[in-house]
Amino acid sequence: MSSSPQHPVPAPKDLAGMDVEDLALYREKFRRRLPESLDELHGPAQGIVDLPLHMAWSGMTSYDLGKPRQRMGLYRTVLHEGLHDDLPRYLNRDLLLDLWPVLRTLVGRSVRTVWEDTFPQLASRTRSAA
């Protein structure tokens, strides 16, 4: 079917039904937040971390890094809700690398794709853990 004002050709959809253009914009939102290098991630590796409301708007605000589930929850929240300046402050490079094989299954596809495409060492951690 050809495109006309009365019968426009529908935009391609991904598996979740999101327009491909919308998906690209959504991924770009996460891509703009990324640090230049994982070496910029100097966040805490232990202790209690309190997140500001712009990240922890719908749940816990305080996380104990000594508790594995809370640590994973903190990283999931920061990856999804953190802004460019939040990532180096709240994420720790070594913890992110250690958590990634499991964490990647807990974050959305767009977050996972953007991080693994930008930082191949994350994708290689996944392959070596398999």
Image (tube, helix red, strand yellow):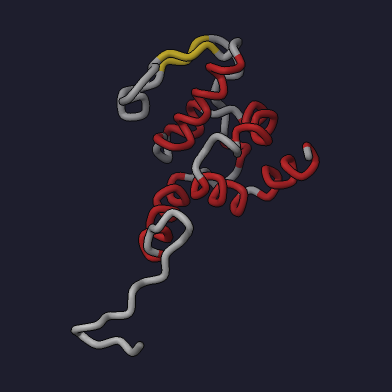
**Residue ID at (69%, 46%):** 123
- Tag count in the figure? 0
Q: With respect to residue 69, does 113 lie above or below?
A: below
Name the residue at 51% across, 32% down: 88
Going 42% across and 60% down the picture, which residue do you hit? 24
Could you tell me residue 41's position as x and y percent? 57, 33
Residue at the extreme front of the image, as rendered: 1
Q: Residue at x 44, y 47 (%)?
A: 30
Residue 18 picture quarter: bottom left
Q: Left or right of 68: which side holds 53?
A: left
Nearer-the-camera pick, 20 or 128 = 20
Image spot of residue 129 (x, y percent) = 78, 37
**The one of 84 and 113 positioned closer to us in this rendering:** 113
- The image quarter containing residue 51 is top left
> Horizontal placement of 118 versus 8: left or right?
right
Quadrant showing the C terminus: top right
Q: In x, y percent, where is residue 89? A: 48, 27
Please tell me which residue lies in front, 93 or 15.
15
Q: Position of residue 90 (x, y in %)?
A: 49, 26
Q: Which quarter of the image is occupied by the N terminus?
A: bottom left
